[in-house]
Image (spheres, helix red, strand yellow):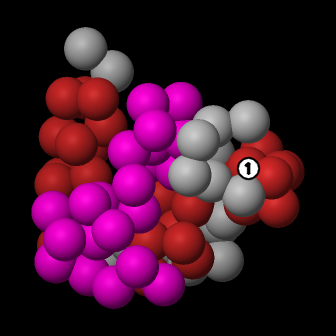
Amino acid sequence: MSVGYSLRLVNLNKAAGDSLGVRLGRTCIENNVPVAAVAEHLGVSRQTVYSWFIGAARPRRGTEESIKALIASLQR
């Protein structure tokens, strides 16, 4: 399990589909990037980020490019 992420969140993320928000979650979990840092970087709430991570919500179109860029930068 990743440091800083609950086992419940990790399991919910694994069970979720493959939406952009879920992929962001997997990348952040793998790289131990705090939800608060993601939320601040993207200008959204922590709850919004959690919802994306578990597939309960999808990012708005205005944030999709920023999320893709964040994922790319974390995968380097």
Residue 4 placed where, x, y %? 56, 52
- Compared across the picture, whether 24 is left or right of 55 comes to left
Q: Is 44 a magenta residue?
A: yes
Q: Determine the image quadrant of residue 42.
A: bottom left
Q: Residue at x 20, y 29 (%)?
A: 73
Q: Which secondary structure class fits the magenta region best? A: helix
34 to the left or right of 7: left
Q: Classify the position of the C terminus by image quarter.
A: top left
Q: Residue at x 17, y 40 (%)?
A: 69
Residue at left offset 73%, top offset 36% = 1
User: Which residue type carries mark 1?
Assistant: Val
Q: Give whichever of 69, 36 is nearer the camera.
A: 36
Q: Residue 63, position in %: x, y?
A: 21, 67
Whether residue 16 is visible, yes or no, is no
User: Judging from the image, what secondary structure is the residue with disc 1 in?
Assistant: helix
| Residues rendered magenta in the picture | 24-47
Given residues 6 and 43, the one toward you in this image is 6
42 relative to 21, above or below: below
Which residue appears farthest toward the top when viewing the image? Answer: 76
Residue under pointer 1:
10
The residue at 33%/21% (across/down) is 75
Percent of width and height locating residue 45: 33, 85
Furthest-front residue in view?
Answer: 3
